[in-house]
Image (cartoon, helix red, strand yellow):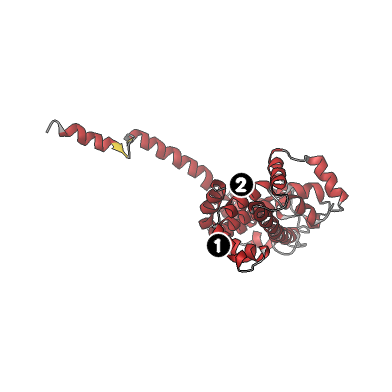
Amino acid sequence: MSDRSPARSRRQVLVGGMPMPSTAERAVKAVFLTAICAAVVIPFIGVISTSLASPDEVVDAGGFVLLPHGFDLSAYRSILSGGTVTQALLVSAFVTAVGTAISLLLTCTLGWALSRRGTLGNKPLLLMVLVSLLFNPGLIPTYLVVQQFGLLNSLWAIILPTSVSAFNVIVVRAYFAGLPTEVLDSATIDGASEWKVFWYIGLPLSKAVVAVVGLFYGVGYWNSFFGALLYLNDSSKWPLQLVLRTYVVDGVEIGAQDLGAAGEALPPQTSIQMAILMISIIPILCVYPFVQRHFAKGVLTGAVKG
């Protein structure tokens, strides 16, 4: 009995070759993780609750409501009544949809060309893409280029300059390079052109990486505000994130005329600000679950292969 008890105790202590943490260590980890989760979740709940709380409740709580007694959509009705926020929401939707489509088209075609051996200028072009990862053009040269092309105060100024990411091109190229060459060569032997091979075989086999790269581009376009701050002088062309920065981060008060609700009583400014913040978050929260299942596969496979 005495010989078997140490072995049994070692089996209890070792799990997968690693020592089992003690009860005190597990308790400390649980408290630490709970505190981190609370620090993330509680402010988010507060934003949702404040945007849905009644005006009287927001005033009584001093501007921040954690658990509202009821739900009031007056803040959302105010910001979606056709004023600045509604216009900015439409602008952001246009920029995100058009920008993501253009970026995916350019990134996938460039990644395909770089992944195909024998393409004219393959290595020099790949070197240029890699060099662009290390050297950025800078703020002033980029502004001068946008100005020379006549894109100032145009929505294309916040779409075209960021339409291709070198990192995404490298990920897509690596994924395309890992596709089975037998399938691609058989299509070529059957008479398919390079474009048909890319469109009917390459892209359908690469849905995972295309979905992930599309998510990267979509989130980037939706959350961008710095380009709009530099290139857009007309406030009617502002995207939602620039409106969010102006009225929430900078604390500029939102008037009834700005919201297209002249002559109407507005909810408290805090409720309106939190409602704008929720409007800017909801689209990404709705899209992400459909792409999440491709996320790990697309990023890891594209980064490891090639």
Q: CA distance from mark 1 to mark 2?
A: 65 Å
Instruction: Please tell me whether mark 1 or mark 2 is closer to you in this view.
Output: 1
Q: Quadrant of residue 181?
A: bottom right
Q: Amino acid at mark 1?
A: Val
Q: Is residue 29 above or below residue 212?
A: above
Residue at 57% of width from left, 59% of height from top?
206
Q: Which residue is mark 2?
A: 62
What residue lies at 73% left-to-right and 38% top-to-bottom?
Answer: 135
Please provide percent x and percent y for residue 162. 73, 50
**Residue at point 54%, 48% (across, down):** 305
Badge 2 crowding class, 10 Å Cα cut-off, few under 14, some 14 to 19, many 20 or more, is few
Q: Nearer the viewer, residue 132 or 47?
A: 132
Residue nearer the viewer, 275 or 107: 107
In the displayed structure, would residue 84 be above or below residue 6?
A: below
Percent of width and height locating residue 224:
70, 50
Say if 160 sits above or below 204 in the image.
above
Question: What amino acid is at disc 2?
Answer: Gly
Indicate the quadrant where residue 21 lies: top left
Residue 83 percent coordinates (x, y): 75, 61
Q: Which residue is mark 1?
A: 183
Direction from residue 121 to residue 22 in the image, left or right: left
Report if the CB atoms under discs 1 and 2 are less than 8 Å apart.
no
Pick the front one: 168 or 238: 168
| Disc 1, SS | helix
* Mark sitting earlier along the chain (1/2): 2
Tell me residue 128's x, y (percent): 72, 44
Is residue 53 visible to us here? no
